[in-house]
Amino acid sequence: MAIQQKLGLSTRLSQRLILTPSLQQAIKLLPLTTLELAEVLEQEVMENPLLEEVPIQESLSVDEMAQVEAKDEAEKTDPLKDIDVDKFFEEYLDDGEQRRTRPSEVPEMPPIENTLTETPDLYDHLLWQLHMSVSDESTLEIGEAIIHNLDEDGMMRASLEEIANMGPYPTEEVDKALALIQALDPPGVAARDITECLRLQLKQLGLEGSPTDLMVRDHIKQLQSHQYAEIGRQMSLTPEEVSHHLDVIRHLDPKPGLKYSPDRSTYIIPDVFVVKEGEDYRILLNDDGLPKLRISPTYRRMLDGKEPGSEETRNYVKEKLRSALWLLKSVDQRQRTIYKVAESIVRHQRGFLDQGIAHLRPLVLRDVATDIGMHESTVSRVVANKYVHTPRGVYELRFFFHSGITSSLGEAISSVTIKDKIRKMIDGEDPAHPLSDSRIAEILGADGLPLARRTVAKYREELRIPPSNLRKSVH
């Protein structure tokens, strides 16, 4: 049967969101720290001759400069008059009322900080090795699941049964994938406890089955509590032999993953200051170090026709002017957006600012986004990599966002507050009879905080506090 095809023309009306280079620039400026923004502005000044720093004696704020330039350009007759600036930036400029009535939202883009990296972390390092070592799709899938369930120390925090249930995968295939990853660099990675971690490293040193390996396997608790004489007696070793094996063990790494996410000494420059004035809190943006920019008067006169120049030169200047104006507006809107987010955080976390961590409220991005009439992805970009100086110390903006539970009295309690309670309970426990996770859950339940034992264990591990049996051995 023949199929007939016919060519024709038709029209269709549709709405599409197009991220122009100017809008992309506005979005990319949001997650930058103050120092990073200063570097961007300095680079722009070097590349765009129309931008120049305002002399100190003539210094104007970025807000004032943007308003002046916008007013000047609105009075001119040039191609820029066709650009609807307010419409273009309505995601950032409006007060929220307009956004709530729009039928569609801007699709959420991945935060820019997820696309920038300096050195590979532990997960990247392991995934690269895995893909270089294995071609079997099933093994790759299981291996990736295992890698994504390692903590930053490189320890395996999910059981093999939990990994197997993700697929589901055959148990023998999970065992095979785990052995493969444990053979990767760094030695000792993907271990399920400290004993396995050290023994994996000894195995790669060719010391499997040696007295050092047996000492780790059978006497880890005594090693942690420094009972070296007792270890020597039980293993029939002289003090010199015990010392030799201890020297080998001391050169092993109990946290092999940390070398790929080292704690570096950093100098934090707050992006926002929250200052208490009487009974209220005032928000100040830190623009110290940011160059004050303006459009060069020389080039503006050229566009006004007050100075001679060819048409080609004038077109070049117009293009650079457009770029400079978008930069000034983007920086101005970045500052306004940061201010709005900080203001909302202060409103939500007033209890913390007044009375401390016990009064920290659960808060998610959606709460702030709804409060200020912006998209969650915008709030996420704003709080990324930024710090706020408060009367209670310097905190990352992300610190104020966390989950929580509802107490028996109906009050929302943040997970940070619960962790603080757990830490204080463990700090005050009897070293001879440390509190178990179950006992801590019982105490919290009696205080109106119903938590499962597994949740207590999770919070304890996030606090980097060992379980009760190891705390007893340590003391």
Image (tube, rainbow, N blue to C red):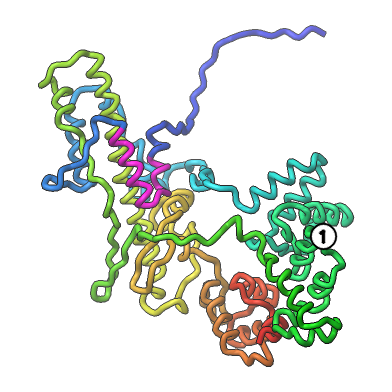
- Prevailing secondary structure of the magenta residues: helix
The three-letter code of the residue at mark 1 reads Gly
> Where is residue 254 shown, x and y percent of the image?
68, 67
Q: Secondary structure at mark 1?
A: loop
Q: Which residue is mark 1?
A: 206
Picture quarter with the C terminus:
bottom right
Horizontal side of residue 44 vs 6, given as left or right? left
> Where is residue 263 shown, x and y percent of the image?
52, 62
Magenta region, residue range = 26-46
Q: Is residue 455 above or below residue 304?
A: below
Residue at 25 percent of width and 30 percent of height? 49
> Where is residue 321 shown, x and y percent of the image?
26, 29
Q: In this rendered view, identify the residue nearer to me: 359 or 234.
A: 234
Residue at 45 percent of width and 76 percent of height? 357
Q: In this rendered view, identify the residue nearer to me: 208 or 397.
A: 208
Is-magenta flag for residue 38?
yes
Q: In this rendered view, identify the residue nearer to me: 73 or 139.
A: 139
Residue at 31 percent of width and 29 percent of height? 83
> Where is residue 243 shown, x and y percent of the image?
73, 77
Q: Toward which corner of the image does residue 200 lie, by quadrant? A: bottom right
Please rate how many residues cluster around mark 1, counting C-alpha atoms within 10 Å: few if below 14, some from 14 to 19, many from 20: few
Is-magenta flag for residue 433?
no
